[in-house]
Image: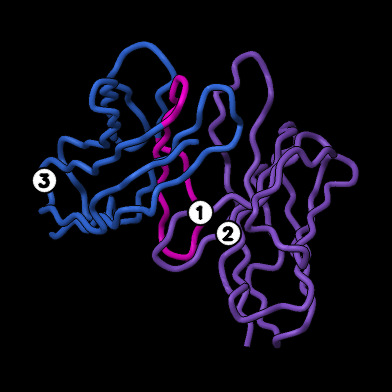
Amino acid sequence: DTGVSQDPRHKITKRGQNVTFRCDPISEHNRLYWYRQTLGQGPEFLTYFQNEAQLEKSRLLSDRFSAERPKGSFSTLEIQRTEQGDSAMYLCASSSVGTRNTGELFFGEGSRLTVL
Amino acid sequence: AQSVAQPEDQVNVAEGNPLTVKCTYSVSGNPYLFWYVQYPNRGLQFLLKYITGDNLVKGSYGFEAEFNKSQTSFHLKKPSALVSDSALYFCAVRDGGSYIPTFGRGTSLIVHP
């Protein structure tokens, strides 16, 4: 399967613990996005990479959140000192850059975080 | 700034009837418009997009959408609904100069047998 994959699919943790999510984009895609989705809401933008460069971060992304894409391939999203308000689905998406790119995103299945 | 409004939290339609899911948008430049569908516990799947050209765009699973610049709308339509179309539908917009789409809150489509 050459789609976007995310791991783990579900993470349950206690408040104050750190968690890390991984995203493997479609191999030829050089743009990678992280979004957060809570129940009854649409996806909210968190951050965006083009290759290994993190080009934009939302104000939603507090200091406890950090994202990396060290080699321009997979990406990790780490949440430190988790809070109950961090409980959400974390979605990763990728897209390609090119003359025919019109920007549709290809999403993974998401990583659901539950903070107890 | 860019934004999307989906005025209906839920749309109910009988199988075989036409369906419409509404979306209005706001951008400062030329809009790039998208519809995505989300099934339970799954990621979002791309359905269709409008970038330029014909105002009526066709996408996956028999869906289509009509771009109306004067009304800043991009409503999703299907001539004949299926029970299997029941899902969450998200409209998204980005300004032509941005690579980050903004999503609406979503509309739950329920198709009754």
Q: Which residue is mark 3?
A: B16
Nearest the eye: A88 or B44: A88
> In purple, which chain?
A
Residues marked 1 and 3 touching at CB (< 8 Å): no
Q: Position of residue B96 (x, y in %)?
A: 53, 22
Q: Position of residue A111 (x, y in %)?
A: 63, 65
> Are both tags, 2 and 3, on one chain?
no
Label 2 and label 3: CA atoms lie apart by: 35 Å
Q: Which residue is mark 1?
A: A43
A14 over B35 or under it: above or below: below
> In blue, which chain?
B
Q: Which residue is mark 2?
A: A36
First to last magenta residue range? B27-47
Kindly state the secondary structure of the residue where label 3 is placed. Answer: loop
Q: Residue at the location (15% across, 40% down)?
A: B80
**What is the chain identity of the residue bearing mark 2?**
A
Name which quarter of the figure residue B79 lies in.
top left
**What is the chain identity of the residue bearing mark 3?**
B
Circle number at residue B13: none
Q: Position of residue B75 (x, y in %)?
A: 26, 35
Marks 1 and 2, the one that precedes in the sequence: 2
Residues marked 1 and 2 touching at CB (< 8 Å): yes
Label 1 and label 3: CA atoms lie apart by: 30 Å
Residue type at the position of mark 3: Gly
Q: Residue at the location (60% across, 79% down)?
A: A114
B55 over B102 or under it: above or below: above
Q: Residues within 10 Å of mark 1 (few under 14, many from 20)?
A: many
